[in-house]
Image (cartoon, grey):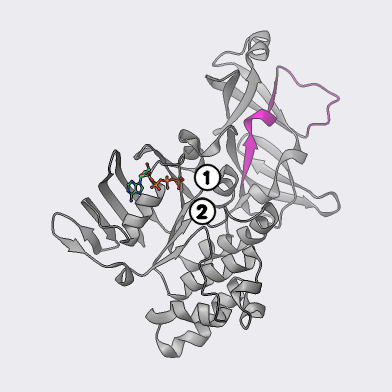
Amino acid sequence: MSLLVDVTHRHGEFTLGAAFSAADGLTALSGPSGSGKTTLINLIAGLIPLQKGRILFDDRVWNDTDAGIFVPPHRRRIGYVFQEARLFPHVSVRANLAYGMGNVAKAERPARMARVADLLRIAPLLDRRPSGLSGGEKQRVALGRALLSAPELLLMDEPLSALDAGLKADILPDIERIRDAEGIPILYISHSIEEVARLATHVVALEAGRIVATGGPEAAFASGVSGQRSGSFLTAVVAEIFEGEGLMLAHAPGGKLYLRAAPVAIGQSVRVFVPAADVVLARGLPEAISTLNRLSGIVVNLREDKNSILVELDCGGDRLCAEVTRRSSERLGIAPGERLNALFKAVRTEPENLYRQKI
Ligand SMILES: Nc1ncnc2c1ncn2[C@@H]1O[C@H](COP(=O)(O)OP(=O)(O)OP(=O)(O)O)[C@@H](O)[C@H]1O
C-alpha cells in the first residue's frame, strides 16, 4: 500500500509545500516545531480541507483540488493516535476499543479485538476504566482503538511525548510489532532522534514548511529533530550473543561491532545509533585500551558545527560521524582522504535505540 502526497497549503504567513510518498513501514516526519508536521498529517487525514494539490492512497484519490475531489475523513480508513490518549473516561477499555470497530464486519469483531488486545498486551485491562490506567497503558489502548478500525494508514502525532522514559521504553516494542505485523504505512511525527533511530524505516524531514531531506534515518539530521545530538547509523548483522556479559557481536560492512545485548536473534539485521560525541579518532591503534569498537575509515567530509568539527568517515560503505574539538582536529591534522581509526565504547550503545529488522 502506498500514500502519495503533493500539497500546498497556507495558514496566514506559513506555507506548507510538500511532495512525498510513503509505503509500508514507518515513515518518521521530523522537523523543528512549527515546520508543518501536524498540518501535513491533518491534511492527509482530511481534518483540514486542502487548498491545492493531491493526496492519493493506492489507486484511490482522497483529495484532488483540481478535480474537485474530497473524500471525508471517516471514509479514508485512517487510524489516528495523538499525543494524549483521548479515551472516553466513563466507559470501559473494552467499550473504548469497540468504538473503533464501526468499519469492521460484526462477525469479525471478537477475533479482531482478541488479536489487537494480544498484540498490545491490553487483554488484562479490558474491563477497567481509562481513569485507572497509567499513561503508557492509556496510550496502548489508544493505539488499539486506532488499529481496531482496520485502518489502511496509521497517523501518529508524537504518541510517546507525554510519557516518561520508562513508559516510552515499555511501549516502543508495541509500536515495532504494529510496524512489522500490520503491513500498512505509518506516518509518525517525532522530535526524538532516539525514536527515529529505533523505529523509522524512512524519514521525511521538514523545515519551515518544505521537505529538506527524505531517505534513511540520517535524513532526520537535515532538520532540527536531533537538536544538539549529531550521530550516525551503522547497519550490522548479529553474529554472537554473550549471554552472561550483556554483550553481542555484530558484523558491519566496516568491521566487527560489539553492542549492548538486545532481544534479537543471531542472523538478525540491526541498525545502531552512534552519537558523534562518543566517537574517538586515532591514527594507529593504541594496544592497551578498553574500547571494544574500532573501525577503520576514510575521512570524506569535515563540517564545522558551533565549537566542534564533525568528521565524517566512510567505514566500508557506512558513514560514521565523529565530533571533535577544533583543537583536536588541528592537532591530528585531519583532512579528507585520510584513513583514521574510529573508536567507541560498547557500553555506550543503547539497546532501546536499536532498530531490528524482522527475520
Ligand atoms: N489553524 C491555523 N491557523 C493559522 N496558523 C496555523 C494554524 N495551524 C497551524 N498554523 C501555523 O502553521 C505552522 C505549522 O504548524 P504545525 O502545527 O503544522 O507545525 P508542527 O511541525 O507540527 O509543530 P510542533 O512540532 O510544534 O507540533 C505554525 O507556524 C503554526 O503556527
Where residue 83 sits: x, y (%)? 52, 57
Q: Which residue is mark 1?
A: 191
Q: Examine the rendered structure and indicate whether residue 188 appears above or below residue 339.
A: below
Along the horizontal axis of the image, is 166 left or right of 154? Answer: right
Along the horizontal axis of the image, is 35 left or right of 310? Answer: left
Q: Which residues are magenta?
A: 271-291
Q: Is residue 290 magenta?
A: yes
Instruction: Give the secondary structure at mark 1.
Output: loop
Q: Is mark 2 within 8 Å of ligand 1?
A: yes
Q: Which residue is mark 2?
A: 158
Q: Is mark 1 within 8 Å of ligand 1?
A: yes
**Can residue 186 be seen by looking at this rendering?**
yes
The reply to whether dot 1 and dot 2 touch (C-beta < 8 Å) is yes
Where residue 239 sits: x, y (%)? 71, 49
Q: Examine the rendered structure and indicate whether residue 310 appears above or below residue 213.
A: above
Where residue 265 sits: x, y (%)? 69, 58
Residue 242, labelled with which disc?
Answer: none
Compare residues 92 and 333 and report the one nearer the observer. Answer: 92
Pointer 2: residues within 10 angstroms few (<14), some, or many (20+)?
Answer: some
Q: Examine the rendered structure and indicate whether residue 241 appears above or below residue 129.
A: above
Q: Earlier in the sequence, mark 1 or mark 2?
A: 2
How far apart marks 1 and 2 lie (CA) works out to 8 Å
